Amino acid sequence: MNQIQMQAAKRVMIEWLKHPQELGREPEQIRYAGTFDLYGMHYYLFKYKRARMGKWLLGVSGGYAGNELENCGHVYSEMQEYQEETAKEDAIVLIETVRAYWKEQAERGEQQKENAGTFLAFVLMEKPFWDKEAFREQLKEVWGIEETASEDFGEADRLKQEMIDLEGELEDLEGELDALELELARLEQMLEEAISEKDDEQRDGEQEAEEETAENIEEFAQSEDWAKRAHRKEGAKAIERLEELEKTQKGRILDWKAYIEEKKAERRPLAWEEHSEEDWTEDGWRGAGWEREMEESEDMLVFHYGGAIVSIALMPGPVPNEEAENHAQRNFRWPDAEKTVERHEAHLMVAILDGMMPVVEAGELLVKILTLCCQLPETLGVYMNETVYQPELYLQMAEMLHQGMFPVLNLVWIGLYQGERGVCGYTCGMRAFGYDEMEVVDSQAEASEVYSFLVDLADFVITEDELLQDGETVGFSEEEKLPITKSRGNVVEGETLKIEFHGES
């Protein structure tokens, strides 16, 4: 047994038990109780006590590949009583519970990311004036953004659906692979039991059984590898075909103009979710041919660019229900925000509807458009992410684009406030990229440290496509392991990830 690895597993088990949602402290006693292999990894059994006179409880920590000291995250206990005779079987049940949980979390995360890519912002204006043609020219001159031709996207849609179908097949295959792995484990256990139970007189028969079982294992392994390679190869082909099509075809501009005109009359933000599958026909968006039937109005610009739909529309009135005025109070960096916002009499509604454009590029596209909006003489502020940005500061933050860096501060708002026991911070804007919002609660660090930490973490998650999960840890060094807990948001609607950050030690 690898003593160093076992001690590492023990430390991880203790840290897991110390979590507030588990034991909440170190166990009174903890002892090594055995080891076993599963799915090609090492697992360690531990028995521990809550109190000195309490019962021994079962815990498992792993899995470890080879002599590695970092495990795959299968650390768990249901605080059931430790039974030596069934400890291994009970631990395997715990491991399967953890695997099922992480698989579910990963599926939820992927679904959340699939729904990402739509960005919406409101440029608050003192007067309802906008020179659309001059703005179109600025987009082209400053950022090289110009309207692309409208073409049929039917083949791309078909390939995209084909990819979705293949992904479904791959998910089914993963389920089959899990079953195969369980069968392999069962066969291996049968082999071990056969070897231990056979006496010297049955050695010859045992050898035959062992060879037969080994052949079965090899057969399962070969079928598993072959099926997995075959399905992944088909998936790769579909992806290649889709990428080729993206380079040569451009999407049809959807009928957002009519929809925006309708919402303008109602003077309220777009509600993209109101469109359903029934709005699509074999020829595309319902009412195809609108391009020929209606002229583009002077206060509206809608076009397709790089796989995304861009919509910019002038609304002759303030943002309804004093939303902008109320949310302007959140901007701790702009004392006069609320007073300034009260002067707005119109607003530009800017929307990026992600089609095939990568979500990071869609976010950067929004920032490029908003920087030009901020330079309009009528602009008072930019309302998005439940706050209002000062135009001058928004332009300063956007300089990161010219330096080849991701403009995280333009797309994710970092808020700060004083809690009962320390500094608190939160993000607003992560969900547009498909990630959970994050919070730091009652930190003992300085406000500037909390702010910088959340900025760096938001940038890391988005640019590195890092999906943080409940129960994991995160850090910017090998030594830093900050626990993550998912629960109801303190100041952000819905569930958020709470990061236990208390500054540099």
Image: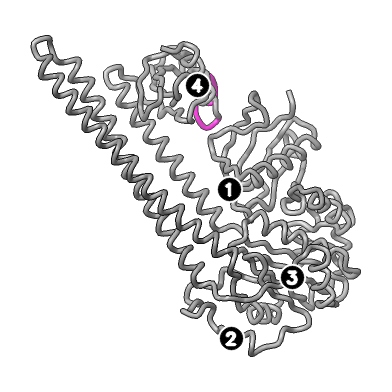
Q: Which residue is mark 1?
A: 495
Residues under numbered marks 2 and 3 in contact, where contact means CB atoms less than 8 Å apart: no
| Dot in front, 1 or 2 | 2
From mark 3 to mark 4, how far is it between C-alphas?
52 Å
The residue positioned 77% from the left and 76% from the top of the image is 314
Residue 289 circle label:
2
The residue positioned 87% from the left and 75% from the top of the image is 127
Residue type, label 1: Glu
From mark 1 to mark 3, how far is it between C-alphas?
39 Å
Residues under numbered marks 1 and 3 in contact, where contact means CB atoms less than 8 Å apart: no
Crowdedness near tag 1: few (<14), some (14–19) or many (≥20) residues, C-alpha within 10 Å: some
Q: Main secondary structure of the magenta part?
A: loop
Residue 146 circle label:
3
Q: Which residue is mark 4?
A: 68
For label 4, the SS is: loop
Where 329 falls versus 292 (above or below)? above
Front residue (pair 463, 341):
463
Q: Earlier in the sequence, mark 1 or mark 2?
A: 2
The residue positioned 79% from the left and 66% from the top of the image is 123
Q: Position of residue 486 (x, y in %)?
A: 56, 41
Q: Earlier in the sequence, mark 2 or mark 3?
A: 3
Where 119 falls versus 276 (above or below)? above
For label 3, the SS is: loop
Front residue (pair 110, 177):
177
For label 1, the SS is: strand
Seen from this angle, which residue lies furthest bottom? 293
Residue type, label 3: Glu
